[in-house]
Image (cartoon, rainbow, N blue to C red):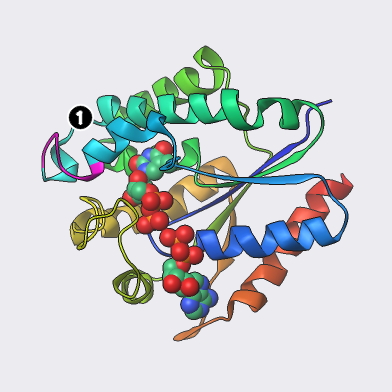
Amino acid sequence: MAGYLIILEGGDACGKATQTKLLYEHLQKDGEKVQAVSFPDYDSPSSALVKMYLEGAFGRDADAVNPYAASTFYAVDRFASYQMKWKTFFEEGGIILADRYTTSNMLYQMIKFNTTQERQTYLQWLCDLEFYKMGLPVPDLVVLLDMPLHVSEKLMSQRKGKTGGRTGDIHEKNREFLTKCHHAYHELAKTYGWQKIDCTKGEELRSPTDIHLDIYTKVKALLRK
Ligand SMILES: Nc1ncnc2c1ncn2[C@@H]1O[C@H](COP(=O)(O)OP(=O)(O)O)[C@@H](O)[C@H]1O
Ligand SMILES: Cc1cn([C@H]2C[C@H](O)[C@@H](COP(=O)(O)OP(=O)(O)O)O2)c(=O)[nH]c1=O
């Protein structure tokens, strides 16, 4: 019987990698069979086109790069990761923790469309491509780390760009794009039942451990079902 697929989703630099690691360690300590993966899979050659896209090879303005084309780069990278790294583990009942997934395409590529109709058409196409045509598993739980943009921007400036660029990728450099992304994720969370976790308390950033305990509670509830 297949295991569980749990996604940690959110804006750039909102703490997904930090929370994936804490959750992984906690579940492992509990004796669960767990594996962590992340997307894009930068260490794999399958991410080559994603890297070209994020470095601006197809256009420096993220908004102007065809969202259907960009989505396929990420989808193919995910397919390769699934086939090569975690399909068997998952099918044999393991718990997969994913730092980003199809949900990131839903968010970052959908916002390139301005009308509800275009967005709906895109989301239907994307879910059909990744979950049915490519056969990637549908998530059991999506945890959305909700962090105000000005807070995550501060965290982003303190760390080096993951694609190797000194000043970040074409998404990170586009504040208007990231703002749109923050607005859209509340809507997607409501529509698709993503579980939102508040990463701030008032104006204060919560500690990683504090945020982790909220996520852990949701994950344990899923595993008990
Ligand atoms: N709750 C938090 N409080 C303070 N710093 C944090 C918190 N969560 C993450 N960070 C730091 O912020 C930066 C971005 O976090 P990271 O987990 O890499 O985010 P993401 O994977 O979403 O890009 C890292 O330097 C990390 O150590
Ligand atoms: C996995 C994935 C990421 N993205 C976007 C989100 C990010 O802006 C960018 C790179 O992801 P990532 O390196 O995880 O960004 P960060 O660590 O800053 O959160 O790619 C998509 O558009 N679709 C996808 O399927």
Residue 60: x %, y % from top left: 11, 45
Provide the residue designation for mark 1: 66
Q: Nearer the viewer, residue 61 or 22?
A: 22
The quadrant of the image that shows the C terminus is top right
Amino acid type for the residue under numbered disc 1 = Asn
The verdict on residue 63 being magenta is no
Can the viewer see residue 136 in this picture?
A: yes
- Could you say which is closer to the camera, residue 220 or residue 78? 78
Q: Quadrant of residue 45?
A: top left
- Stretch of the chain drawn in magenta: 54-59
The verdict on residue 57 being magenta is: yes
Q: Residue at left 76%, top 26%?
A: 91
In the displayed structure, 149 sits above or below 168; it is below
x and y percentages locating residue 144 in the rendered image: 54, 56
Q: Is residue 208 above or below residue 22?
A: below
SS of the residue under disc 1: loop
Local crowd size for mark 1, using a 10 Å CA cut-off: few (<14), some (14–19), many (≥20) = few
User: Where does residue 129 sit, x and y in percent of width and height?
Assistant: 45, 18
Q: Main secondary structure of the magenta part?
A: loop
Residue plotted at (79% across, 57% down): 27
| Residue 116 in view, yes or no | no
Is 225 left, or right, of 107 in this rendering?
Answer: right
Q: Nearer the viewer, residue 11 or 26?
A: 26
Residue farthest toward the top in the current orientation of the protein:
133
